[in-house]
Amino acid sequence: MRVLVAEDHRVLARAVAVGLRREAMAVDVTHTGDAAERMCLLTAYDVLILDRDLPVMSGDEVCRRLRELADPPRILMLTAAGDITDRVYGLTTLGADDYLPKPFDFSELVARIRALSRRAPTPRSPVMRHGGITMDPSRREASIEGRPLALTPKEFAVLHLLVEAQGAPVAHDEIVRTLWDEHLTPQTSAVRATVSRLRGKLGDPGVITVDTGQGYRLCD
């Protein structure tokens, strides 16, 4: 899942980004409304966490403009105002998908983001299979030949991409772009290290192969 955090309170933005990355989300951060709009035009974010009180361009205006796109991100608006009329205005007039007043509990933020991501126009199958691998994304469970796999969030996310591809190669750059944030370059070893750990947990290094020039893929 790729998330953009648009929040001018830099300490809060950094804390949210760090926490979401620990939940295996790819997170970008910006502190102004105009930059938030520009980044959403350039990158297909699944969820935008949007503070209403942004400088340069308000969060309200960003929300209005993004709603004119053919495929806008899901928008979770944040505000220090907790009045019910404020929340109704954000959900109805502005067109936000969800609303969360500050201060908020981080676990609730994560739950709301995951709920928004499940509202995708083309829902995925609740259970995915390829070869001997079975995955249930909604429960974050995976197994191979009936043996449960204890995967970290990032390992689960990489395996999810590979199972979705159903044996087709998934490019290294695509994995970086989808599962890591903008600060990770394709030249880093993070993907290779994650795949190496996955191979060990799957019990057979040959389950995931590397097609030179094409990417990683699952064998049948």
Image (tube, rainbow, N blue to C red):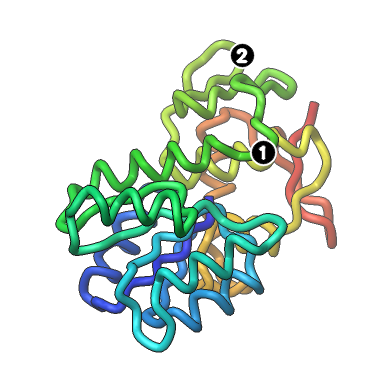
Q: Residue 121: which disc?
A: 1
Task: Identify residue type, mark 2.
Answer: Glu
First in sequence: mark 2 or mark 1?
Answer: 1
Residue at position x 84%, y 62% from top?
213
**Quarter occupied by residue 135:** top right
For label 2, the SS is: loop
In the image, residue 24 lies at what x, y percent?
A: 44, 49
Q: Residues within 10 Å of mark 2 (few under 14, many from 20)?
A: few
Q: Is residue 87 above or below residue 14?
A: above
What x and y, as percent, mark residue 91? Answer: 41, 50
Q: Is residue 107 left or right of residue 47?
A: left
Residue nearest the viewer, comparing 47 with 95: 95
Residue farthest to the top, as pictured = 146
The image shows residue 220 at horizontal and vertical percentages of 80, 26
**Pick the front one: 28 or 214:** 28
Circles 2 and 1: CB atoms closer than 8 Å: no
Q: Is residue 104 above or below residue 173?
A: above
Q: Is residue 15 left or right of residue 215?
A: left
What whole-number distance in Å separates the C-alpha atoms at marks 2 and 1? 32 Å
In the rendered image, residue 94, in percent from the top left (x then y), is placed at: 46, 59
Whether residue 124 appears in this view of the structure is yes
Q: Which mark is residue 145?
A: 2
Q: Which residue is at the front of the view, 94 or 51? A: 94
